[in-house]
Each structure stands twice: as C-alpha cells, then as structure tokens.
Image: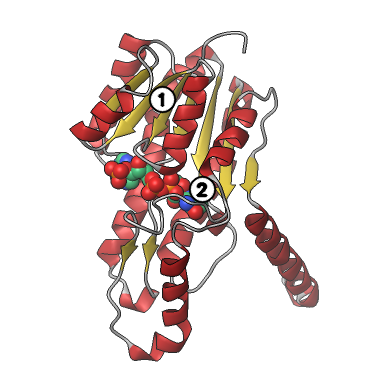
Amino acid sequence: MSEVKTLLITGVSSGFGRALAQLALSRGYRVIGTVRSAAAKHDFVQLHADNACALELDVTDFTALDAAIAGIEASQGPIDVLVNNAGYGHEGIMEESSLEEMRRQFDVNVFGAVAMTKALLPFMRERRRGHILNITSMGGFITLPGISYYCGSKFALQGISETLSQELAPFNIHVTAVMPGSFRTDWAGRSMVRSTRSISDYDALFDPIRQAREAKSGRQLGDPAKAACAMLDIIESASPPTQLLLGSDALGLVRNKLAAMQAEIDRWETLTRSTDG
Ligand code: NAP
C-alpha cells in the first residue's frame, strides 16, 4: 500500500463490518467505524491504539449525518473509502408483515446507505477520487419466500449502487455492490427482525424456511474474515468491479436465476417484441 488510507465503515460491532475493520487495521489502514452504543464504541477503539476511531451513529439519524461526515473530514482528514455495511434482515411473509416494518427495513438498508453516501460525495467529488462499497446481498438479485422486504431493500440498493457507479465514473469515484451469500455473522441471530405469524395458510410454505434459517444461524458456509480479505482486495484494486458476489452459494443461486431469466425471456420474446411500432 503506497499511502495510508482511511476507511469509514458503518456497523462495526459485529459481522462483516467488524471483520473488515480488524483486517484493515492489521494492514495499516485507519478505520473510522460507526457503532450504536457507548460500550461498542469503547470496545472498537481497543482494536488499535492509533488507527481505530469509533463514532456513535445510527444511519437512520438522517439529520445528523451531514455534520457527522463533515466533522470526520475536518478532524480526521479525507475519507478514502466508505463501506455502507450497516443493515439487518427482516423476515416475514409479506401479508403478515406491517408497512411500518417495511419502512424501517428500507430506512436502514436503503435510505441510511444513500444518506451516508450523499453526505460524503461532495468531499470525494472535490478530490476526484474515492471508493464506495455498498454491502447488498445475493438477496439483491435472487429471492426467497419470507424475505420480501429484505430482498426489496437490497434490490433497491443494488440498483442505486449500479446507477451511481455510472454517475461517479467521470470523477474517478468507484462504486461496488458487494453481494454476499450466507455468512456466519449475527445477521440471522440477534440482528434479525421476525414478524409474528398470523395466517395459517402460509404455514406449509414458510414454517420450514423459518426453522431452517434459525437452525443454520452461526453455521453458514461463509467466513466473514475471508469476506473481509475479498473486500480489501477490491479496495486495493485499480479497477474494482461494479458488483462482486461472495461465496459459492451466491454464485450458484445467481447463475441459476440468470439461466432461468434467460429461458423466460426467450420463451416470451415474440410477445415482448409485439409492442414496437
Ligand atoms: P451483523 O453481524 O448483524 O452486523 C450488522 C451491523 O449493522 C451491526 O454492527 C449493527 O449494529 C449495524 N446496524 C444495524 N442497524 C443499524 C443502524 N440503523 N444504524 C447503524 N448501524 C446499524 O450482520 P452482518 O451480516 O455483518 O450485516 C452486515 C451487512 O451484510 C448487512 O447490510 C446485511 O444485510 C448484509 N448481508 C449479510 C449476509 C449474511 O449472511 N450475514 C448476507 C448478505 C448480506 P448493532 O450492533 O448496534 O445492532
């Protein structure tokens, strides 16, 4: 690494954010991590005497974000890389899940990431350099019954991320949507919000899915430390990808969906073409 880079990572108390922060610190980066409690703040700064800095911030505290980013830029220097990692999974059959639960899911996973990005962009654009990583999910491309709000939020961030990469390319600012498969973080454990069941018609479809996710929590295929290695690889790349899948599960499921989409597009091609003219 030619110069010390500063990373701002949202949600460093556990999971991907924590793993990436630890690896980056071990490789000489400065890491500013957001947390949501004084205890987590105290815990994070213990990771490195000089280079670990913690900021108490909920990404849905929208009115506070501009000042928070400007404050970091003024007191700590330029933020080279923003990792929009903070997020959680809502699990629930759509008909059983409230609109309020949907709003919260989108506030954190979509609006939070966008608001953080908007607060930082004037600084990155001025410098004509930067890299933004949006941690989306394989659920930003494939879907499964029972996580419609989550997939909707990740599809949204995926679309925003891809569009943004085109808007920011002229300014030498890279944008990468990182799409993990299933990893051993707190995602399906303490962090998950599960709607209460109320409609027995869905029992046969959904009960096995909920039970399987609970049983698998903590034993998923993916290792967050290895995901952190992959993320640092793209942070250090001169030409990072617009999207990056992480994990063989994500790879297989996305490839299957692409093939199914291709087949469906081909099957309906005549009707699709029929509306021209
Ligand atoms: P995690 O261990 O539960 O970590 C989530 C982090 O986000 C925690 O630090 C949490 O802070 C923080 N956070 C949640 N809501 C927040 C808010 N409103 N404001 C600020 N911080 C907030 O789970 P994870 O798997 O590492 O999740 C990180 C990202 O990866 C999420 O966007 C998730 O959707 C995505 N992802 C995970 C998987 C997977 O299998 N694990 C797969 C694909 C994508 P607190 O400790 O304060 O709650």
Q: Tell me which residue sits at (29%, 55%) in the image.
A: 104
Residue at 26% across, 39% down: 58
Q: Residue at x 42, y 31 (%)?
A: 9
> The disc labelled 1 sits on which kind of residue?
Leu
Q: Position of residue 34 (x, y in %)?
A: 32, 31
* Image quadrant in which the C terminus is located: bottom right
Q: Which color mode does the image show?
A: secondary structure
Mark identifier at residue 200: none
Quadrant of the drawing holding the N terminus: top right
Residue 275 seen in render:
yes
The single residue placed furthest to the bottom in the displayed view is: 201
Residue occupied by mark 1: 120
Viewer-nearest residue: 95 or 26 = 26
Q: In the rendered image, which residue does mark 2 sit on?
A: 136
Tell me the SS state at disc 2: loop
Mark 2 burial class by Cα count in 10 Å: few <14, some 14-19, many 20+? many
Q: Point out residue 196 in the picture as x, y percentages from the top left corner.
A: 27, 75
Q: Is residue 255 left or right of residue 124?
A: right
